[in-house]
Amino acid sequence: MDRIPIFRELLVFMMLILLLYVCHADIPQIINYQGKITDGSGIPVSDGSYDMRFNIFDVETGGTSLWYSGTVSVDVTDGIFSVVLGETPQPSVDLPFDEDYWLSVWIGGDPQSPRQKLGSVGYAYIANSLVPGAEVIGAVTTGTSSVITGTNTATTGISHGICGYSASSSGSGVYGYASATSGNATGGSFETESPTGRGVYGTASATSGDNSGIYGHSASTAGSGVYGSNSAGSGYTAGVYGRCYSDEGTGVEGWAWATSGTTYGGNFTSTSTEGRGVYGRVTASSGVNYGGQFECASPNSKAVIGYASATTGSAYGAEFETESPTGRGVYGTASATTGNNYGVYGHSASETGRGVFGSNSAGSGYTAGVYGRSYSDTGTGVEGWAWATSGITCGGNFSSTSTEGRGVYGRTTATTGINYGVYGETSSPSGYAGYFQGDVDIAGSISKGSGSFLIDHPLDPENKLLRHNFVESPENLLIYRGKTRLDETGESRVDMPDYFVALTREDDASIHLTPVSTPTLVAAEWSDGFNSFIVRGTPDLEVFWEVLADRDDPVIHQLGRPVEEAKGPDNKHCGTGELIYPEAYGYPESRGRNYELHSRKPWNEDTITGKQEADR
């Protein structure tokens, strides 16, 4: 047997060891190579170690060596040898394997021929970066099998069962397609068993631009771009959960692109008997934040519409809550500076319903069921309007069940100007600017054009009324009267109330006497302290007496007004040239006092009909 045998028969088994750590791990650049060495008669060479060299060429004959192993000592048994090409101290087989290669084997100093063309296994190197057009194709016929399955058994670290990557500006890292036209087919199905895991985790790592961690799309008329479901029967679960750390970001954002039709940026439904269609919460304990914020750009649409379809029970179209000591359960803003808009608008079609119902359950403190505020110079803090043109309607209906409550409390805090704690007005000639059922208590003074009492006529209460007008006087007049009988000396003493001196200008008080039955002379004289007077006349005579006195107490000095006042800018009742009752003197209504102020309304009288129809 020759020491350097002829390489007549070479059985080559090539195996590429691919550790397919799909995304980031490097593939070992080595090739397992096996062969059989025989002599010219086909008999295996003797067992032992042989020096071999290996080259990889780009052509079958000649050409340039692309890789060289150097001299390698290889053990041969029964003519069979096995070597790992690229294993240290050899250089790694660092070739792209994107074209044909040939392996040249040298035993001792003799090259063996022909060169061996590397088969398809060698080209598995390019699985680290598939050439354009490369496909992985498989098929299964059972309903529980997978065409491709990626498994990563690592229990720690950032590991992936399958990782897909695309560098195309319109490509997809992973694309799933379900061609079935019926049934619950899914383009991609992802699952995690970790108690803190994510079935699908999407990341958009770009810090700018319009990108999405997860983007869903549906072309179906009844489909959903993204559908989230949680099958847990209890606990704090979420069908879809979104989180955002940007100071201008959104945890979950919904957008309906269609410019017509009944579209929804977000549609939320709860079928629970204690559920919420939408629940918004802000956990920040400071700052300007909102449990829910809604916005609409359409001129005829609603930023928020809540609908409770239940026909019984205490169902709510929307419920809002805040735990902040200075918070708002509902905060509505109409930022347009013109037009007929509302910060909050409520409507009810029920015969006993309320368009807006406000309630405060606090048992003490300065609370309000409904609180309104306006900064406009013609605005109204709270405005109530009853559109019906007949029936007992109320622009505002206020009640208090407290033993110290107020059905209506009106206050003006301005210290100057013409303002009113409560202002009432009626346009009907048979209406009333104010009507009170019960006692009326006034701490200040009253200014009026006329006054009277009106009662059922005592002689015919079913068919007549009796009106007596108030007694008017330029003085703040007090009247005291009575009857006395003179004694046997022809005198009688009449005592005045103990407050008489404190209440009246007693030294100017006048005494008026009228004898009963017989005309005769009578006279009267005040005592030194003006707390009584003596009537003198015929003994045993009955005399009617009357005392007229002007008030002189501290209150009248504070509230009293002069009999005659000059009109002008400093007069709270009338300016120069203005009249309280202009029509009575033949002047037009526009000459009335504060006509511009009283005729100016926070609504446009000319558009009332159109406004009413639009609201309905």
Image (tube, grey):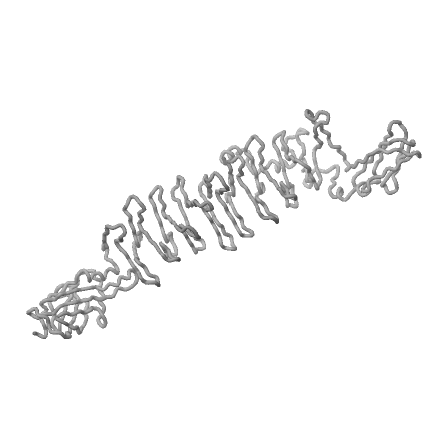
Q: Residue furthest left?
A: 41
Residue drawn at the location 52% of the way across and 55% of the way down: 285
Question: Which quadrant holds residue 2?
Answer: bottom left
Question: Which quadrant holds residue 22?
Answer: bottom left
Q: Residue furthest right?
A: 489
Q: Residue furthest front?
A: 233
Residue nearer the viewer, 99 or 571: 99
- 133 vs 280, left or right, is left
Residue 514 is situated, as x and y percent measured from the top left of the image, at 86, 30
Residue nearer the viewer, 90 or 574: 90
Question: Which quadrant holds residue 493?
Answer: top right
- 506 vs 124, left or right, is right
Residue 402 is situated, as x and y percent measured from the top left of the image, at 63, 43
175 relative to 603, above or below:
below
177 relative to 432, above or below:
below
Residue drawn at the location 24% of the way across and 52% of the way down: 140
**Residue 419 visible from this viewpoint:** no
* Circle count: 0
**Residue 269 visible from this viewpoint:** yes
- 436 vs 98, left or right, is right
The quarter of the rendered structure image containing the N terminus is: bottom left
Residue 265 is situated, as x and y percent measured from the top left of the image, at 41, 45
- 570 vs 211, left or right, is right
Residue nearer the viewer, 351 or 524: 351
Residue 398 is situated, as x and y percent measured from the top left of the image, at 60, 40
